[in-house]
């Protein structure tokens, strides 16, 4: 029996032509973060139940949302993929997914690293690895995993836009903003629906602190990156951050209500953005009304998840701000269990997540000296629990505000000067400097 191949030339076990078409469509949807790739890959599996790589894609779709309830499905899919695998590539895919489903993020990342070295045109391995690098805060590998395969790609190859978009984000996280913007813009030229590439260039504008450019990049092009996109909330969040930097608080709240939190998404990755935006507004003294209450309610089912410390921090932001003491206590108990576990989340929690979560509680309680004591030791290695520079800025903003409110003027002045040096045109940074200079 002849083994069929995908569009990149990889043999695909157990496939039919129709199943490969469904798989390729699902892969495209995942690359662009649009549509419903899970429903599409399920059509491939219905057509070809022994198609190993389709089961692996199904596993990745349940893993990359970092939601604990999806882990059992991901494990089952990885096991099914392994059972039907007949090539080393398919076996490595199944192994990587199984390791991450078991909480071994860094082990899974290394398996995917080997897979990409052997099969540089395997876009699913690249995208899964890129996302795992993001969740583990490995900025260098975010860039270099993609850089290693660039010589094997060109614009004539389907999916090259995704390689460029991923490289753009990795370059941005490593501070190479000019090259990142070029790569991201080229990705959009090749595929205007590549939501990750839109997001990568938005990060460039955020890190350069040019909110006007960021707004011009995102706002007129919302139809490209928001329509039918399951990543739209994050790009709306970026647009809101640019307006927040311009002190357009009413517009930020309007964006939250229309496109970020108001629609009531209970998807964890969306709720992270919801928590992060409301917290930034609250740090500025903006009254966010009863928005905390509904957000805490959406986070409530995840208080006992304990699978990813980055999520726990943002859940605590909502619980503490909403005054939900019982949920906050449950989450802290969950963190204690994670610290006694043996997966990578034990390290994410110990190194950053647990002290950061305690700091949020202390801030809401008005114990600003404790916030400073908890955040200062972790701020330089906060990348170890994942997220981007833009997302982890929440910790720096909280530390500066806590230093100001605690009365530690020397520290507050030092931190404010540091931020003003990085963002000299930022009104918020200049306000920090002015507040730190005021006599007690």
Image (spheres, rainbow, N blue to C red):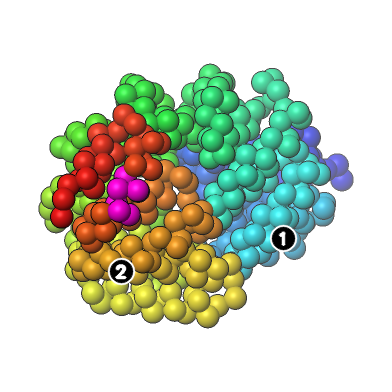
Left or right? Give the position of 270 relative to 401. right
Can residue 400 be spotted in the picture? yes
Asked whether the viewer can see residue 230, the reply is: no
> What element does badge 2 sit on?
helix
Decide whether residue 414 is among the magenta residues: yes
Residue under pointer 2: 370
- Residue, x 33% and y 62% (percent of image)? 372
Comparing 21 with 59, the one in front is 59
Closer to the chain start, of discs 1 and 2, is 1
Q: Is residue 330 above or below residue 87?
A: below
Magenta span main SS: helix
List x then y, in percent, for residue 294. 21, 59
Q: Please state the horizontal and vertical placement of residue 165, each as a whole percent of the image.
A: 56, 32
Q: Quadrant of the N terminus?
A: top right
Judge left or right: residue 411 versus residue 31. left
Q: Residue at x 29, y 39 (%)?
A: 429
Q: Is residue 178 above or below residue 305?
A: above
Q: Where, by quadrant of the figure, is residue 109 drawn?
A: bottom right
Q: Which residue occupies 74% across, 44% down?
A: 116
Name the disc covering residue 345, or none: none
* Count of marks placed on residues: 2
Circle 1 — which element? helix
43 drawn magenta: no
User: Which residue position holds label 1?
Assistant: 95
Image: magenta residue range: 410-416
Q: Residue 25's spot in the image, x, y percent?
A: 58, 36
Image vertical order of residue 417 relative to residue 155, above or below: below
- Image point (49%, 34%), residue name: 200
Q: Residue furthest right?
A: 1
């Amino acid at each position: 029996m002849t083994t069929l191949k995908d569009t990149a030339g990889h043999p695909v076990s157990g496939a039919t032509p129709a199943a490969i078409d469904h798989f390729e469509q699902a892969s495209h949807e995942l690359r662009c973060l649009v549509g419903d790739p899970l429903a599409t890959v399920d059509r491939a599996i219905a057509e070809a139940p022994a198609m190993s790589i389709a089961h692996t894609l199904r596993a990745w779709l349940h893993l990359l949302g970092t939601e604990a309830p999806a882990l059992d499905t991901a494990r089952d899919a990885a096991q099914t993929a392994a059972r039907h695998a007949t090539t080393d590539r398919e076996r490595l895919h199944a192994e990587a997914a199984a390791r991450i489903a078991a909480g071994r993020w860094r082990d899974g990342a290394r398996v995917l690293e080997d897979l990409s070295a052997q099969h540089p045109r395997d876009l699913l391995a690249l995208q899964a690895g890129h996302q795992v690098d993001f969740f583990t805060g490995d900025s260098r590998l975010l860039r270099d995993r993609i850089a290693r395969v660039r010589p094997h790609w060109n614009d004539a190859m389907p999916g090259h836009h995704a390689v460029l978009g991923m490289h753009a984000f990795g370059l941005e996280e490593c501070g190479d903003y000019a090259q990142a913007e070029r790569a991201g813009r080229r990705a959009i030229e090749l595929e205007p629906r590549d939501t990750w590439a839109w997001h990568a260039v938005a990060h460039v504008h955020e890190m350069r602190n040019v909110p006007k450019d960021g707004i011009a990049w995102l706002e007129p092009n919302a139809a490209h990156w928001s329509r039918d996109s399951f990543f739209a909330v994050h790009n709306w969040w970026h647009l809101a951050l640019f307006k927040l930097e311009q002190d357009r608080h009413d517009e930020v709240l309007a964006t939250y209500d229309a496109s970020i939190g108001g629609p009531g998404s209970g998807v964890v990755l969306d709720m992270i953005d919801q928590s992060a935006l409301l917290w930034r507004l609250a740090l500025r003294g903006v009254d966010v009304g009863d928005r905390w209450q509904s957000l805490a309610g959406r986070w409530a089912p995840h208080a006992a998840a304990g699978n990813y410390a980055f999520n726990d921090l943002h859940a605590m932001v909502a619980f503490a701000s909403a005054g939900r003491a019982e949920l906050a206590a449950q989450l802290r108990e969950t963190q204690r269990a994670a610290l006694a576990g043996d997966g990578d989340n034990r390290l994410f929690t110990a190194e950053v997540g647990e002290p950061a979560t305690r700091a949020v509680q202390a801030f809401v309680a008005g114990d600003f000296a404790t916030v400073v004591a908890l955040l200062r030791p972790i701020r330089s290695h906060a990348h170890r629990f994942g997220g981007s520079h833009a997302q982890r800025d929440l910790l720096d903003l909280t530390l500066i505000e806590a230093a100001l409110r605690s009365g530690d003027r020397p520290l507050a002045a030092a931190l404010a000067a540091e931020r003003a040096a990085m963002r000299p045109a930022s009104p918020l940074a200049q306000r920090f400097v002015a507040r730190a200079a005021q006599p007690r």
